[in-house]
Amino acid sequence: MTSLSREFESEQHAFLGGRARIGHSVADVLVREIEDRIARESLAPGFRIGTKQELCERYGVASATLGEAMRVLRARGVIEVRPGPGGGLFVAEQSPLIRLAHSVLQLRQQGATVNDIVAVLDALDEAVLRDAAEHRTAADLKDLDKLLAELTKVWGDPVAGLHCNWRLHRRIAEISPNAVLRTFYLNLVDYIESESVGESSTFDVMGFHPDTQERLQIHRDLVEAIRMQDETLQRDAIVRHRTLGR
């Protein structure tokens, strides 16, 4: 079987013409592969995925890489590790939020397009921005300002600008105390980014240009609306930020 390492290298060349994929390691690919398999095959809680040695051999990865992937999967509540004879990695009993995340992973098999996902994000943005404005802390604002400064620097880069844009949206969503809204939004953003790695344009919308200075100013206004906790600024920024139905 082709190792994940070789698959990962192939993806790098296919998506970015030989440049390294931003923010994606072999462990990231392994995490996605295991999550996709659980969702694709509808593996039940308690299903034995394999031992550490079996998984290293199956996917052609080093023990340290598998260990890194396991830490992520356990933190997400996807797997549990049982020691001793007959032990190994097992599908964990999943909370409703984990099941929600897996349902997002299945969207790819169901043929969902990036535009389908963006339409849902456009509908959720107002609730996400309202929560962020209401609950933001000084530390949150510091992080948003840092991301905004970085976004300004890389805005003209079609790859780095795209990734930084989504990091900003992720950080805004992370402020929300609503676990369902936060989890759903973040998983949708992950889906969009995974489908558009290396692309200069995320969306297929006539007349829409994601890298204009006007678009950059809209993101500045989103952060300012959060800072000022002003509902009028929030509504105005959200309307101008919408990608579909413009």
Image (cartoon, grey):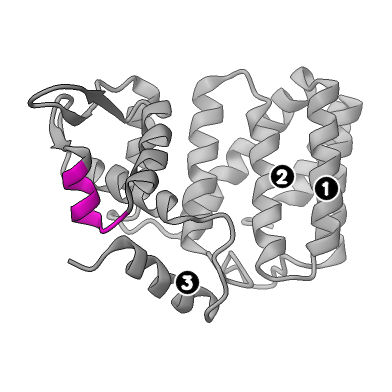
Q: Which of 95 and 128 is in front in this view?
A: 95
Separation of residues labelled 3 and 2 (CA atoms): 24 Å
Whole-angstrom CA distance, mark 1 to mark 3, is 27 Å
**In the rendered image, which residue does mark 2 sit on?**
168
User: Can you tell which mark lies on residue 12?
Assistant: 3
Contact check, label 2 and label 1, Cβ < 8 Å: yes
For the residue labelled by badge 3, is the local secondary structure a helix, a strand or a loop? helix
Q: Is residue 54 left or right of residue 237?
A: left
Determine the secondary structure under disc 2.
helix
Q: Which amino acid does label 2 sit on?
A: Leu
State which quadrant residue 131 falls in.
top right
Q: From which residue to which does the magenta span run?
A: 53-61
Q: Residues within 10 Å of mark 2 (few under 14, many from 20)?
A: many
Disc with the residue nearer the chain's start (3 vs 2) = 3
In the rendered image, residue 31, in percent from the top left (x then y), is placed at 36, 45
Task: Report which residue position mark 1 lands on.
Answer: 148
